[in-house]
Image (cartoon, rainbow, N blue to C red):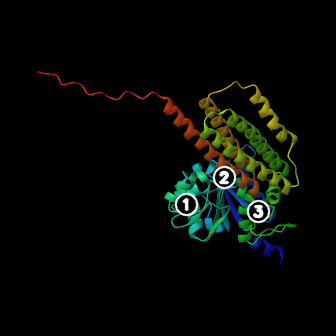
Amino acid sequence: MDTNGQEMDKKRVAILIEQGVEDAEFQLPYNALKKAGAEVVVLGSRMNEEYKGKQEKLSIEADATTTEAIATDFDAVIIPGGQAPDKMRTNMKTVRFVKDAMEAGVLVASVCHGPQVLIEGDLLKGVRATGFRAIRKDMQNAGAEFVDEPLVIDDNLITSRRPGDLPIFTTAILTHLGLSLPDTTLPDVGDADAGWWKLGEEWGGSSKSEIVNAINTAIAGERYGLEVFDNYAKNATDEAMTELFHNIRANKQRHIQLLEARLDVLGEKTSLQATASAAFANLKNFFQTRQSDTEILRRALGDLQTGVVDTYNLRNKLTDPATVELFDQMEVTLSKDEQRIADLYKARLNASVPQPPMPTSRPAVSG
């Protein structure tokens, strides 16, 4: 094929941009499509504005605006997430551009909070789709059949849930457009064991060292928790508390095993810092004074709440599907354990509150 023929066959892809976009959700598709030879056009709400990412890793100006752009001039439209879609959905020109693309059969790919734009355009009625967990109910209320999977394809709509799905999401876009990458074999999007982190790293996502550091951070937290909850179980006088603490310890032990197995797949070992976290927990416990069961429950609740937040933050930092899925499972388990501790704590507080005396009958007053 001559050069002119190659130019005529070149795929044109629009990526929407707004302030507060999730950096990786813009960068990975942008970089991969560029490497595959596509013409990537960044569309914002206005020109001459520097758009910055939520994580402050991205800074870029738009090539054009959704006001002037024609949807059918593109082979695909990508809606990244973060805080950007909440701004995009207030721009009627952006919503109309996406709606025009959907109705014309142009590929529309949306990740994380991206479906907020689809909701605004009434584009999810009767559609199978996914998105960030926080907007699940919004999507269902808009008529979508919400599917909690890394990738959901329904006709010309591709959706994914979070940064951890990005290598699969981006591969699905490339495959749909018939694009390939030099010296790279794209895996099947349904292959969970494809080593997706490598593509994520190649396209500007999490490096192997970042993934390994995150796993070791999680191991340190769970090893610390294992020792702390062992101490709580030894000091509690209530049998129900002791049993619950042992169940939580079992969950943490399972998490450690799964995290270490993930490190093994990556060819890495647990760091010294992660290993030493248990010793720190023992030292902290040694200096603790004897506490009541209610005080122990309150401390346990704080430990689990910290674990939920830390795991959530680790999950949203990475672009490795396998590690992120593991963190997601951990967060769900930690949240359930948190609720169990909270229920027991509130029950004990209610039991300790003096109940008002029962009213007594008053003798009749004679007239």
Please state which of residues 299 and 99 is positioned toward the viewer in this rendering. 299
Mark 1 or 2, nearer chain start = 2
Amino acid under label 2?
Ile
Amino acid under label 3?
Leu
Please state which of residues 325 and 172 is positioned toward the viewer in this rendering. 325
Q: Residue at x 61, y 31 (%)?
A: 293
99 relative position to 186: left or right? left
Q: Position of residue 302 (x, y in %)?
A: 64, 35
Work out which quarter of the rendered image holds the N terminus and state it: bottom right
Amino acid under label 1?
Arg
Q: Position of residue 364 (x, y in %)?
A: 18, 25
Please state which of residues 311 and 37 is positioned toward the viewer in this rendering. 311
Q: For residue 244, which quarter of the picture? A: top right
SS of the residue under disc 1: helix
Residue at numbered disc 1: 96
Q: Residue at x 13, y 21 (%)?
A: 366
- Residue 49 visible within the image: no
Residue at numbered disc 2: 17
Mark 3 or 2, nearer chain start = 2
Residue at numbered disc 3: 33
SS of the residue under disc 3: helix
The vertical placement of 56 against 171, above or below, is above
Q: Residues within 10 Å of mark 3 (few under 14, many from 20)?
A: many
Of tags 3 and 1, the one toward the viewer is 3
Q: Residue at x 61, y 32 (%)?
A: 298
Q: Residues within 10 Å of mark 1 (few under 14, many from 20)?
A: some
Mark 3 and mark 1: span between their CA atoms? 24 Å
Mark 1 and mark 2: span between their CA atoms? 15 Å
> Is the residue under label 2 in contact with that under label 3 (CB below 8 Å)?
no
The vertical placement of 235 against 167, above or below, is above
The vertical placement of 20 against 15, above or below, is above
282 relative position to 141: left or right? right
